[in-house]
Image (cartoon, rainbow, N blue to C red):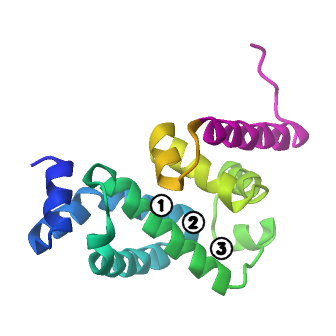
Amino acid sequence: MNGKKLAARAIAGDDDAFLSLMLMHKEALYRTALAYLKNEEDALEAMQEVTFRAYAKMATLKKPEYAKTWLIRVMMNYCRDVLHKQKRLVLDEDILLQQGISEDFTYLEVEDALAQLTDEQRELIHLKYLQDVKIKEIAEMTFTPESTVKTRLYKALKSLRSFFEEKGGIRRVR
């Protein structure tokens, strides 16, 4: 059964359809949680909490074709809530090396660059490039014109590019 029909059944209250829908999108939800929370245990806990929240609010989903996007949005909102409650801890390179983390700091540099963006910009980057959500869907999901989404995405990418150029990255020639 395709995702749209499954979502329509889940919205109508079919528990088996809801379970199948969650299983269909579990990888995208887990990756989203892990990208935000940076911790496997927290990501698994987020999966449980979002499953509960989505089940409780499934009937509020208006368009079945946006079920995946809606679930990801629920996950992002939950993760943002968790991060606001936690005090963020900044680790330096020595601590990371003591914990056995590789000397490849590329991942950390990307995280550092993303941290420079606003919450809205991070969400746009995450939706567009990590979850492959189309600009049109992002616009509908956020009740924003497509042109505004494109402009905000362009500004976020420009900020990332600028961040890496300041760090000594090599600028590509077009």
Give the image location of residue 26, x and y in percent: 31, 62
| Looking at the image, residue 126 lies above or below residue 99 | above
**Residue drawn at x 14%, y 73% as measured from the top left:** 13
Quick one: SS at disc 1? Answer: helix
Q: Identify which residue is drawn at 79% across, 56% down.
A: 116
Distance CA(mark 2)–CA(mark 3): 21 Å
Query: Residue at the spot x=78%, y=74% of the render?
Result: 90
Residue 32 got which mark?
A: 1
Q: Name the element at disc 2.
A: helix
- Which mark is nearer the camera, 3 or 1? 1
| Crowd band around label 3 with a 10 angstrom C-alpha radius: few (<14), some (14–19), many (20+) | few
Q: What residue type is disc 3 on?
A: Gln
- Single out the mark in the foreground, 2 or 3: 2
Q: What element carries label 3?
A: loop
Q: Which of 65 and 30 is in front in this view?
A: 65
Q: Which of marks 2 and 3 is nearer the N terminus?
A: 2
Say what amino acid the circle numbered 1 marks.
Thr
Of callouts 3 and 1, the N-terminal one? 1
Asked if residue 5 lies left or right of residue 33, the reply is left
Rounded to the nearest angstrom, the CA distance separating label 3 from label 1 is 24 Å
Chief SS of the magenta region: helix
Give the residue number, with chain letter if any, for mark 2: 36
Residue that badge 3 annotates: 99
User: Disc 2 residue type?
Assistant: Tyr
Residue 26 vs residue 109, the one in the foreground: 26
- Which stretch did the figure color magenta? 147-174
User: Magenta span has 158?
Assistant: yes
Asked whether the beta carbons under mark 1 and mark 2 sit within 8 Å of each other, the answer is: yes
Residue 22 picture location, percent across and down: 25, 65
